[in-house]
Amino acid sequence: MKSPRALVPIVIGLLVLGGWEWFVSSGRVDDVLVPAPTQIGEWFWSALRDGSLASATWVTMRRLMLGFIIGAAIGIPVGALCARSSLARDTIGIMSLGLQTLPSVCWVPVAIIAFGQNEAAVLFVVVMGTVWAVVIAVQESVLSVQPLYLRAAMTMGSRGWHLWLRVIFPAALPGVISGLKQGWAFAWRSLMAAEIFVVILSGFGLGSLLHAGRELLRMDQVVGVMLVVVGVGLLADLIFFSPIERWLRRSRGLER
Amino acid sequence: MSAPLSSEPGSQLTLSHVTKRFNGRSGLVTAVEDISLQVKEGEFLVLVGPSGCGKSTLLSLLAGLERVDEGSIKLDGANVVEPGRDRLVMFQQDALFPWLDALENVLFGLRLKPGLTDAERTEAARYYLDLVGLADKEKAHPHELSGGMRQRVALARSLAPNPRVLLMDEPFSALDALTRDQLYGDIQKIFTQRKKTIVLVTHNIREAVCLGDRVVLLSPNPGRIRQVFNIDLPRPRRINDPALATLAADITTALSAHLAEPKEGLV
């Protein structure tokens, strides 16, 4: 027993699972429609053993990482440009704000028409899902950098690239990180949409596994994959974004 | 009085007929008008006046953060047109970078100064942190320091690249009285040791008398020079010294008299 705080959700979780199991096995619902936790567990175990889950997760993560990195690599400089030039802000900035509100599934038809049923279409959807949120977040966090920092840095002789890399970027970093986190969440959503709708032979991802579960009427597989999707999202937050955010807040005295 | 257009011998910083206007909500506002002033090498000059007298504007102009509309500002004979390492500023808030520790903050300006090795830069940064009494705090981030300590780091940061002139924009106004008194002592010690030319802006007349060799009284709307006081009290001065308090009272009287005058241009 590590701490009582960690124990409470575990106990409640087990109670819910137990209740669920009992409810399904009592025959009150059709277990094709509502699979019991043990059924999901069985699917999970078999998918782990035949390697399909691992390979699907790998394919999905590879697409996600690639799309996210491309989206961030475009979004960060474009966001910085929007913060610097009011012309860029009034054009690219406004467009980004609009496109950010567009649900990323809407890019799927565009991608299929433009690229066909292939890897490029999936990548396009993920990049479109990521880039606008990153542009907006970077623009806003650069614009809200305290002018005092800039004045101080300029009197010390900082100009141009030095000012951007040593002052503006570090000062805007907390906002940029939360923008990247949002971009990541959007990328994750758009990738699932893309994998469900774009049927491709170059790789079988989690979305495809989910889609296959639907076609086979395997509710255990559908729910199982959904749990994996939730788990990946949670893990990315817990082992990547949260530690960075916490470190940033702590090193600047915004926490504890 | 006719203001000289060329700098007199011994004068380091020369302001000639400096005027600065801003676009305000009710049209063009003249922040400072026709200011002519000379600061000698190694002089501690204080600009004092009520809010709206343009003293902070004047400091921004000296720093090169704003450009003059009329007149000129010369440092060692060269026109001041942009911010530069030869004129470093201590701001009202400490303006330390929260992502850097104390040593790195002091190193920021030093790193931009060419012709030094990294070892020399670190040595200089440590020297100035030690000078302001914070040798043991070099690894502390700004949020781990008190307001007074942060302002000390800011002082070390401004002194480290060895500027020709140190500009101070009400750097003590956000501090508590005890910390402030302590810093008055520190500043005077550093001023006497390092023979630095300092221009300080403040609305605190006692502070002005405590620190300045010369106190320039500005009046508002638009900001103009009203009177100049030479302070001949021996250093180090203590803020609670009765002689100092008497002088401060004289300046306060002068200021009130100017403020009571009918304003031209408002009719």
Image: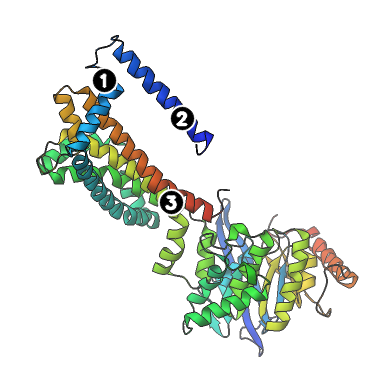
Q: CA distance from mark 3 to mark 1?
A: 38 Å
* Left or right: A48 in relation to A5: left
Who is closer to the viewer here, A78 or A29?
A: A29
Secondary structure found at label 3: helix
Q: Up-down: is B231 above or below A96?
A: below
Q: CA distance from mark 3 to mark 2?
A: 25 Å
The amino acid type of the residue labelled 1 equals Pro
The amino acid type of the residue labelled 2 equals Pro
Please give the name of the residue rendered at 59% of the width and 72% of the height, measured from the top-left corner.
B157
* Left or right: B203 in relation to B102: right
The amino acid type of the residue labelled 3 equals Ile
Please give the name of the residue rendered at 73% of the width and 82% of the height, measured from the top-left corner.
B192
In the picture as drawn, the residue positioned furthest to the front comes out as A1
* Left or right: B248 in relation to B175: right
Image depth: mark 3 or mark 2 in front = 2
Labels 1 & 2 near each other (Cβ < 8 A): no
* Left or right: B72 in relation to A206: right
Q: CA distance from mark 1 to mark 2?
A: 23 Å
Q: Position of residue A197 (x, y in %)?
A: 16, 33
Q: Which of the numbered marks, if any, corresponds to residue A9?
A: 2
The answer to which of marks 3 and 1 sits earlier in the sequence is 1
Q: Mark 3 — residue?
A: A244
Who is closer to the viewer here, B231 or B18?
A: B231
For disc 2, the chain is: A
Who is closer to the viewer here, A200 or A114?
A: A200
Who is closer to the viewer here, B78 or B42?
A: B42
For disc 1, the chain is: A
For disc 3, the chain is: A
- Please tell me in which quadrant of the rendered image residue A236 appears: top left
